[in-house]
Amino acid sequence: VWRWHGMIALNIILIFVCITVLYYLLRIRKQLAEWLISLKSMHETPERYLFVKGNDILSDINFEINGILKKSRRQLAKLQRAEAASRQLLTDLSHDVRTPLASLIGYLEALDSQTAKEKEEYIHVAYRKALDLQELIDMLFQWSKLTSGEQPYQMEIYDINELTREIMIGHIPVFEKNHISFSANIADDEWFVKIDRMAFARSINNLISNAVKHGKCSLIEIDIQKNKGNVKLSVSNNGAGIPEPDIPFLFERLYKCDTSRPGNGLGLAITMELTRAMSGDIAVRSIPGGMTAFCLTLPLIVREN
């Protein structure tokens, strides 16, 4: 009798197990069918996510699939933005290249029919246009290397005070030509930072050139201070200032506060990329009609004697 009861119990257990397995197989099949329908519908509604009831392994799988979908959507959105930005960059740069090139060709073609005095003036203008074209091409190559990760860096320790003085001295003829006064508040002490010399020089040159070309200023000041383990270098000017709505977008590529002004909108974007590559940061503050200051922050290196 006990043996017979044991057989019945075993059969009941086996039936229960079979029913349970069959239930889960049917549930999995149903869930897979729903997932397939949802995945197909995502072509029309890409923001849609998968959903499953319960709190078991299917829920875990569903959670992971939704995570993959979310990540894929972010990557797709990033690629779409990059593609749109690349098309815009190509369009804007094509226009920026054609304008000085057409002007340069026009002045060169007109040289034969001009007097000696007019020829000298035309050659001078053509030379300026050629420099504008060269600057644009240099900016484009620089940006291309930065965004592709092909920009080489040679990080070494330099005295930021001495290096900044050297850079500023190179701009004195430009200041004098544009009737801009300049001042520097740079300590005689040695304050060391670990930077790429060319990247640092390019960053400071971009900030100074930006003030000269677009700041409409009569004074440029450079100030270097130490603050909580960092060195803060500010390039300020007393020009027209930057409207507050434009400030959050200044370091985006191709952005111009005034679309009618010359320039390609790459200078500050390049400065931001170079500064970050040197473990630094850059910010701007501006008072319209007052003072505009670009502040570059770099980690201070303490050297033991």
Image (cartoon, rainbow, N blue to C red):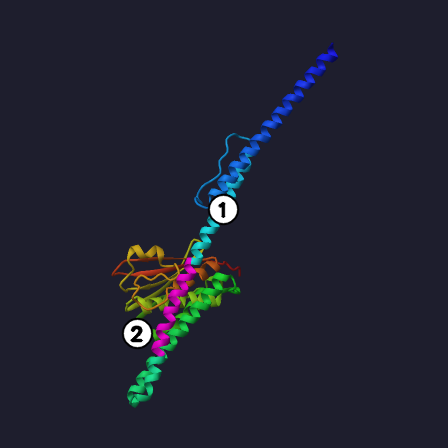
Q: Give percent across and percent down for residue 10.
A: 69, 18
Residue farthest toward the left in the current orientation of the protein:
289
Residue at x-position 59% and y-position 29%: 24
Residue density around tag 1, few if under 14, some if 14–19, many if 20 or more, within 10 Å: few
Q: Nearer the viewer, residue 236 or 257?
A: 257
Q: Give percent across and percent down for residue 109.
A: 34, 84
**Residue 42 position (above or below residue 19):** below
Reading the image, the residue beneath label 2 is 178
Residue 110 shows up from this direction: yes
| Residue type indicated by callout 2 | Asn
Q: Main secondary structure of the magenta part?
A: helix
In the picture, measured across the screen, residue 176 lies left or right of residue 74, that is left
Q: Reply yes or no: does residue 86 show up in magenta.
A: yes
Q: Reply yes or no: does residue 242 show up in magenta.
A: no
| For marks 2 and 1 on the same chain, the one whose residue lies earlier in the sequence | 1
Residue density around tag 2, few if under 14, some if 14–19, many if 20 or more, within 10 Å: few
Q: Give percent across and percent down for residue 77.
A: 44, 51
Q: Quadrant of the N terminus?
A: top right
Q: Which residues are magenta?
A: 84-104
- Tell me the element at label 2: loop
Reading the image, the residue beneath label 1 is 71
The quarter of the picture where residue 242 lies is bottom left
Residue farthest toward the bottom in the current orientation of the protein:
116
- Tell me the element at label 1: helix
| Residue type indicated by callout 1 | Lys
